Amino acid sequence: MSLLLATIVTTASRWQLLVNFKNSILGGNTAPTGSDCIGTLNSEDYNLIQNLNDCVISGITTHNITGQNSLLGPLKDNGGPTFTHALLVDSPAIDAGNPEVPSSGGSACEIADQRAQVRPIDDDNDDIARCDIGAYEFTLSDTHLYMPLIIKGN
């Protein structure tokens, strides 16, 4: 089984097979015991794995992020044909995907996310557009600023 640009969260069971994955998030799962996976994962790099307690990670791990909360929103309609978990504003997955040109082969990210949002977008304002890890490309328009309403009295 291979996963590309996947976000796997909140499942009640754990993976128990050999999985090849790249540019993917594995975190926030709800198995009664253990971590976000069990057994061996073959990394093709640029992954975010939240809890490694029962996992063995083989393969290319140079740019993997481990042991950090993925900071994902709830599964919901964020646009596109299927529900997705949006990246929250401080997610370590933002701009942490493979920096190669999208859809150029190898472990490069796809040109669009699961919602058909074009990748990459410079989400952290460092003037470098880079894909986000996972199935969802964060955009600054995903954030909302709420200002207080002040009414001047007579």
Image (cartoon, rainbow, N blue to C red):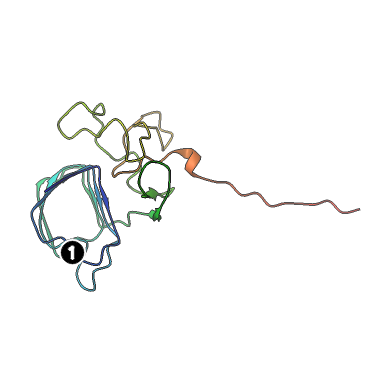
Q: Which residue reaches farthest front?
A: 81
Who's the residue at 24% across and 73% down the image? 32
Q: Disc 1 on helix, strand or loop?
A: loop
Q: Is residue 153 left or right of residue 148?
A: right
Who's the residue at 21% across and 73% down the image? 33
| Mark 1: amino acid | Arg
Eyeballing the image, is 22 above or below 15? above
Number of on-image labels? 1
Q: Nearer the viewer, residue 95 or 22?
A: 22
Tell me which corner region of the image, top left, top right, bottom left or bottom right, holds residue 22: top left
Q: Nearer the viewer, residue 25 or 113?
A: 113
The residue that disc 1 covers is: 14
**Percent of width and height locating residue 28:** 30, 61
**Percent of width and height locating residue 105:** 17, 28
Q: Is residue 131 left or right of residue 140?
A: left
Q: Which residue reaches farthest right?
A: 154
Tell me which corner region of the image, top left, top right, bottom left or bottom right, holds residue 112: top left
Q: Residues within 10 Å of mark 1 (few under 14, many from 20)?
A: some
Q: Which residue reaches farthest bottom?
A: 32
**Percent of width and height locating residue 149:** 72, 51
**Percent of width and height locating residue 123:** 41, 37
Eyeballing the image, is 74 above or below 141? below
Who's the residue at 58% across and 46% down the image? 145
Who's the residue at 36% across and 30% down the image? 129
